[in-house]
Image: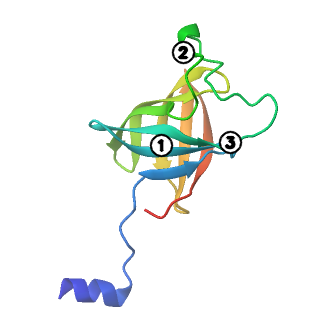
Amino acid sequence: MLLAFLLATGAPAPSPGIAGDWLTADRSAIVRVGPCGERLCGTVVRVLARGNGVPSTDVNNPDRALRSHPLVGLKVLTGFARDGPGWTGGRAYDPKTGGSYRAKLSLGRDNSLTVTGCVLFICKSQRWIRVDRR
């Protein structure tokens, strides 16, 4: 009976969460977010940037031994746990700079993913767009 009422009233569908594939803000890569053990992480599954000077490896990594690792397969989001309406406790890695930042994730009303990275008290956000239909 309750199910029939919810269907008849057009109740919103439950949130799809953040698992799935996301186009980064600069449109240079697709990152797949999903479980990594008990936490969530995000891995580059496709590099979209093309042209001269576009690296295929992690050339800006501060650890010289990791600079030859391919960008595809690189974890750029690690260690996120659900915290109320968002996901916190993780880190975001930027292969363009080699920087790693404390980060939080939140799902927007438009089904976008806001990735916010912080250094001390200075934070910057990016809006990623979902590219799959999970």
Query: What is the three-letter code of the residue carrying label 1?
Result: Leu
Residue at 39% from the left image edge and 75% from the top image edge:
12
* Lower position in the chain sequence, tag 2 or tag 3: 3
Mark 3 vs mark 1: in front = 3
- Residue 105: assigned label: 1
Which residue corresponds to mark 2?
Answer: 66
Residue type for callout 2 = Leu
Quarter of the rendering occupied by the N terminus? bottom left
Outermost residue, right direction? 52
Q: x, y (%) of residue 57?
A: 62, 25
Horizontal side of residue 42 vs 94, given as left or right = left
Tag 3 residue = 28
- SS label for mark 1: strand
Above or below residue 19? Residue 8 is: below
Q: Which of marks 3 and 1 is nearer the N terminus?
A: 3
Q: Image quarter for residue 112?
A: bottom right
Crowd around label 2: few <14 · some 14–19 · many ≥20 (10 Å): few
Determine whether 4 is above or below 56 in the image. below
Q: In this view, does 83 lie to the left or right of 31?
A: left
